[in-house]
Amino acid sequence: MQLLTVFLQEHNKLDTLSKMREEDNWIMHHILDKHVISIPPVNLGGFDLNLSISMKILMLIIAAVLMLILFTYAAASNKKRKHPTGLGNFLEMLMVFVRDDIVKPSMGHGYEKFLPFFFTLFFFILFVNLLSLIPGMSTGTSSISVTAGLAIITFIMTQIHGIKNNGFFGYFKGLIPPGVPVFVLPIMIIIEFIALLTKPFALAVRLFANMTAGHIVIYTLIGLIFLLGYAVIPVSIGFALFIYLLEILVGVLQTYIFTMLSALFIGMAIHQDH
C-alpha cells in the first residue's frame, strides 16, 4: 500500500512537470510548422514521399499566387497607360531599385540576363516575409528547409554560371589566389572548398534566424502578461507593437541582404578576374 502511494505521488509529479513543459513550450508550438492539408505519402523506389501541405508551405503557395496576380495586373495596367500609375508604378519602382541598387553594383557587366532570376528571388522572399506579419499567418522563411532551399538555388546558379563562363577547370582554378606556394595548396583547396559551402549556409541561417527571432520576441512579450500579471499589459503590448513594426523593417532588410549576397556570389563566380 505504501509503495502504491509513493508511485501515485511520483506519477502526479511527473504529470505536473509534463504540463509545465507544455505550458513553457507554447511559444515553440506557434513557431514550429504543422500540417494543414494531409495527403497520403507516395512510395517512389522504396521511399515514402510526403506530399502533405504544411502551414509554411501554404505561405509559399499564397506568396507565389499573390505575385502572379499582382504582377499580371500591374503589367496589364501599364500597357494601357503611357505612364505607369498606382500599383504598376510602385512595382516598377521596386524593380528599378533591385536592378540599379542591388544587382548591377553587385554583379557588374553582364547582369542583365540575370534580372528575371533576381526579380523573382527578391519579390518572392519579400512577399513571404510580409505575409508573416498578418495575424493568423505563418512565417515561411522561419523554416530552415525553406531558406536552405533558396540558398541551394543560389548555390546551383553560382556553380553553373561560374563553370559556364570560365570552364570547369578554369573556374575551380580561379578559386585559388594566384601566387600561392605549392606546399600551401592542399590547405587552400580545403579552405576554398569549405568556403563554397559556407556561403549558402550563411544565406540560409541568416534569413532563418532573423525571421524567427522577431516572432519569438513578440510571443515572449505577450507571455509576460500571463507570467507577471495584467499590470504589465501596457508595457508588454507596447513593446510587442514596437517589435512588430520593427519586423516590417527586418523583413524588407533581409530580403535586400539575401538578394544582394546572391548577386555578389554569382558575380564573383563569373568575373573571377575581378
Image (cartoon, rainbow, N blue to C red):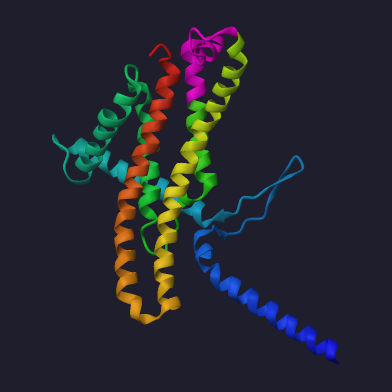
Residue at position x 48%, y 9% from top? Answer: 178
User: Relative to residue 41, is residue 205 depicted above or below?
Assistant: above
Give 267 or 75, whichever is nearer the viewer: 267
Q: Which residues lie in the magenta part?
A: 158-182
Q: Residue 124 in the image: state x and y as whole percent.
A: 39, 42
Q: Residue 212 in the image: state x and y as whole percent.
A: 45, 53
Residue at position x 61%, y 76% from top? Answer: 19
User: Relative to residue 266, is residue 19 depicted above or below?
Assistant: below
Q: Is the magenta stretch mostly helix, strand or loop?
A: helix
Residue 66 visible to the viewer: no
Residue at position x 45%, y 58% from top? Answer: 138
Give 155 or 224, whichever is nearer the viewer: 224
Q: Residue 219 in the image: state x and y as whole percent.
A: 43, 65
Residue at position x 39%, y 26% from top? Answer: 264
Q: Residue 56 in the image: state x and y as whole percent.
A: 50, 53
Give 94 or 19, whichever is nearer the viewer: 19
